[in-house]
Image (spheres, grey):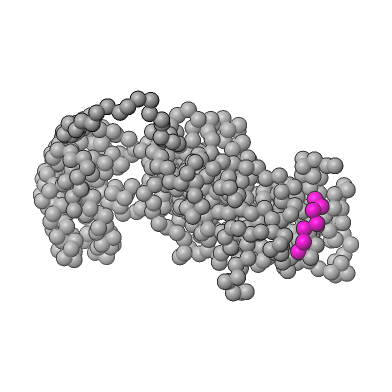
Amino acid sequence: MRSDAEYTAVKDRALDRLFGLSGVVAVGVGGRERAGRATGERAIRVFVARKRPRGELPQDQLVPAEFEGVGTDVVDLGTPAPDPRPDLCVRRGPSGSPPGSASRLDTRKWSRLIGGAMVSSAVDPKAPGTIGGFLEHTGDPGKVYLLSNQHVLGEAPPLDHPVKADTGTRVYHPLRQDFPLERLFAGNAVGNYETGDRDTTVDIAVARLDPGVKWYADILDIGPVTGTYTLKPEEVDSHCFEVRKRGVATGYTGGTVQAVNAAYDVDGIRYSNLMIVKPHPNPGLPTTVVNHFSDHGDSGALVVDGFNRAVGIVLAGFGPDEPAAMRGWGKVLPVDVVLHYFVHTKQMPVRLATAPRARIPRVVGQPAPPTASPTPTASPPPYASPPAPGPVPLAARPRTGSAAAVLRADLGRTVPGRRLLRLWQDHGEELAGLTGRHPELADLWRANGAGPGLAELLRDLISTVRHEARRMPAAVGPVPLGEYVDRIHHAYARLAGPELRSALARSRSALPDLAGLTYAQMVEALGPAEEGRHDH
């Protein structure tokens, strides 16, 4: 009896001959199928665009009945076999989905990063993908990595000479913002590209999350990741092995693995280690709509089994040049290949983040919480009222994360600061819209002959966070800083609606004069920290 490795080796030796045949799309190892029923016999599965009668093909274009003693099984994608009968395969997972589209991508922002949500990179902000999961450093809680594809986090077109990310490339959830106030107050940047590759073995990358970033070892609609699992070919032979994923294009979908160690060309790169996933039928779709397991935008999504064990990561959906019946099938990179790349090739002491139950809050830089409450060894001390909290000195406050994150945290501790945060939270869209529609407001953000613009002033503010001795300018050109801020306020208030105008007035009245102050002095000028209070 042949071993799994021997079946794979025979398949690899057959690739040149099989891909030389007209209409061959993919080649993998899996169970032979006859009339929609798996026979249990291991075979080389040859996926073709359309199965044609032997009489229509020249002899040298026929798929051989066997190769080195291993039988072949031709999978007709033009008229795919029916799904196994319910008595043969008990389906538990979700159905397939209509195709994704740019207008239907899930762009929601989550307060904690979570698998299945959107991620994008500064290397190509217009090509977002999906957060697969997270890798944890085995000894340093300050090192947590977001996992997705290299073509999502680390490369941008063209394919022949792609733009490459480096460790200075920022990564965002869900998307990069272009309006300066949005970047300052919304904080969509979550980390920096760390490493990755796109070659004949992997298309995988990680971004190191900033200190203080909050996250879950969960996947939306699925729950906590419980571990990893490597599929065995014999488990695939029945065509009943179910997998699921959650991506930003097609959402929560399920399907069955049809082949492993499959060879397929993706953007001119031939992989030979993929799993091919056929989507579960979706009775609600019209016959004219192609059923999908994954599509563009789902790249990077973690694929799990029925026990929430990670089995792989979505590499890509089948492209527009493929047979219509196969466009929605998934190409999945096995999880053992992913982890081998980081642990052995990149020498990173990491593991896939898992959780024993749903939504256990995690924070980069803080140890993982205990999975269960410790058993008390002694009676608790008598209750005593804690002392009333006093102002928290700036030097004693945690200063983790980006400079913008530190600023947002310090603003949130004071009433005037919270008013500024609420101004953007409640009216940011209107502020950005006014700036886009009115050239006179857009001009305020640009430097001119009279001095620097508002964008540069915000950069000055951010620079004071990390440089203790740096001070805000006393004036903007010939205009004192306080008067300049008043001019900005009046320019927006003149064009704002009633609610925004009122919010601008409240925020301006609470803002002290920042001219010539260091960051510590600005925080002090906002007033004492009032932890636990909320300004409404």
Q: Residue furthest top?
A: 378
In magenta stretch: residue 309: no
Residue at the (66%, 63%) spot, across then down: 326
In magenta stretch: residue 41: yes
Pick whichever, 141 or 424, lies toward us. 141
Task: Residue 12: give x, y in percent of width and height.
Answer: 77, 46
Residue at the (29%, 42%) spot, across then down: 404
Pick whichever, 487 or 143, lies toward us. 143
The mark tally for this picture is 0
Q: From the viewer's perspective, tell me whether residue 192 is left or right of residue 62.
A: left
Q: Residue furthest front?
A: 379
Q: Tell me which segment is drawn in magenta.
A: 36-43
Q: From the viewer's perspective, tell me whether residue 124 is left or right of residue 65.
A: left
In the image, residue 502 above or below residue 390 = below
Task: Residue 414: give x, y in percent of width and height.
Answer: 18, 43
Task: Residue 8: give x, y in percent of width and height.
Answer: 77, 44
Image quarter in which the N terminus is found: top right
Q: Which corner quadrant of the image does residue 366 belong to? A: top left
Q: Is residue 97 visible?
A: yes
Residue at the (18%, 66%) spot, across then down: 497
Q: Which corner quadrant of the image does residue 2 belong to? A: top right
